[in-house]
Image (spheres, grey):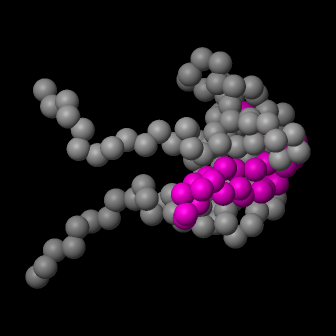
Amino acid sequence: MFTDRRIERHQLPCFLKVFNRLTDRPIGYLGNVSEDGFMLISQLPMLIGADFELRLQVPGRDGQLQSIEITASCRWCHEDVTPHHYDTGFVLLRSPPEYRELVTALRTYFSFYPLQTSA
């Protein structure tokens, strides 16, 4: 059985932290993103229908953490398959251009394209 990894794994939840912008306390991690919203993975359930002032902490181009401040509304929340964790869906109300750049960067990084063959 093959056990050696050829591609280094990156545990995204370790990097893509989400903070309450008003209290500066961490509330969870990005589970996924789209142009219009994202899913949060947290240890506490979120209030459905409430608006949240949030800050995403993501690696910047220079390797330093970059803050992206957004306002989002909680649309749904349910318990994750991992015990004591919750998945929460947010729709964006306000976001800077850096959020769109993050979505594009993640889509590019995690996409697989067909190999170009020469004719």
Residue 24 inside the magenta-drawn segment: no
x, y (%) of residue 64?
A: 60, 56
Find residue 26 and report its image quarter.
top right
x, y (%) of residue 8?
A: 33, 44
Along the horizontal axis of the image, is 105 left or right of 80? left
In percent of the image, x 64 and y 24: which residue is there?
85
Q: Which of 92 and 22 is in front in this view?
A: 22
Residue 88 seen by the camera: yes
In percent of the image, x 43 and y 43: which residue is there?
10
Q: Quadrant of the C terminus?
A: bottom left
x, y (%) of residue 75?
A: 77, 43
Q: Which of 67 and 2 is in front in this view?
A: 67
Along the horizontal axis of the image, is 34 left or right of 43? left
In percent of the image, x 69 and y 25: which residue is there?
43
Against 83, residue 117 (above or below) is below
Report the magenta residues as a range: 50-77
x, y (%) of residue 115?
A: 23, 67
Magenta: main secondary structure equals: strand
Q: In which quarter of the image is the N terminus?
A: top left
Against 60, residue 20 (above or below) is above
Q: Which of 87 and 22 is in front in this view?
A: 22
In percent of the image, x 82 and y 41: which residue is there?
24
> Total marks drawn?
0
Q: Farthest residue in the top direction?
A: 83
Residue 56 inside the magenta-drawn segment: yes
Along the horizontal axis of the image, is 33 left or right of 95? left
Residue 103 seen by the camera: no
Q: Which of 111 and 77 is in front in this view?
A: 111
